[in-house]
Image (cartoon, rainbow, N blue to C red):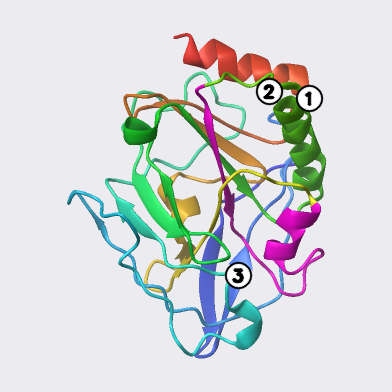
Amino acid sequence: MRSRPARVATVISVAVIALVSCGDDDDTTPAASEPEPLPTVQTTTAIDDAPPGEGPNATVSPELPEQFTGEVGPVEVHGGSLPEFEPGDVESDPARRMTAPVVIGEDFEGNTVRIDAASDGPTLAVFLAHWCPHCNEEVPRINELRDSGAFPADLNIVGVSTGISPDGRNWPPSQWFQDMDWTYPVMADGVDMQRETFIAANAYGLASFPFMVLIGSDGKVLARWVGESDTDKLLQRIEDNLAQ
């Protein structure tokens, strides 16, 4: 299933609603999943062409409820956002060969996490929602390829925890990633209240979950796709696009 992009809409002064979707394949019928309202998260983000620093300069509101501490992070974006991805349109995706924005955030323990392929080499950014059943199916396949050593040796994999919902299954996401045996870096996405969206997800044009963006060592997008893929298809997509 697939549907509208992740976004956050203010419903009252102390709450926001995240409207996000979960997909099982690139070519299936749209359907939406709507988590319950989230407390207000006032995250400041910079979107510009200035050279990125070592860690994010963005901040998260100190009024963030205790249950969200460490689950939402400061996220800073350098460069223009990619257009919204149209599921099923992998080959004609207008984002292909566009320069991917550099995104700087933190993991659940406050360590800096970056998506910066031009500096770090070929990168696969994997956007996941803890409550999404298809993400729960896809992560074990990624782990299977990891454990078998099948991924290209120079490929960096970075997870992004986004579309969070405290009333969704597998809350909190920090524990979910541990339970799923995710061993790659993972960025806790932030919320931009002015744009009413999840920051990193919006910067990369997220359409539904799971959402993957493959970026070449020149910093340009090689491919984006959504939904579940079996291990053979996932590996083939990565290898074919890296070879271009």
Where residue 142 sits: x, y (%)? 72, 33
Distance of label 3 from label 2 (alpha carbons): 28 Å
Determine crowd level at label 3: few under 14, some 14-19, many 20+ residues with C-alpha closer than 10 A. Answer: many
Residue at left 70%, top 29%? 146
For label 2, the residue is 234
Q: Is residue 154 visible?
A: yes
Say above or below: 189 vs 91: below
Residue at left 71%, top 55%? 177
For label 3, the residue is 71
Q: Is residue 28 visible?
A: no
Among the two numbered marks 3 and 1 on one chain, the one whose residue lies closer to the N terminus:
3
Kind of residue indicated by mark 2: Leu
For label 1, the residue is 230
Q: Quadrant of the N terminus?
A: top right
Residue at left 69%, top 21%? 149
Q: Is residue 43 left or right of residue 145?
A: left
Q: Is residue 202 magenta?
A: no
Where residue 236 sits: x, y (%)? 65, 14
Label pair 3/2, CB-CB below 8 angstroms:
no
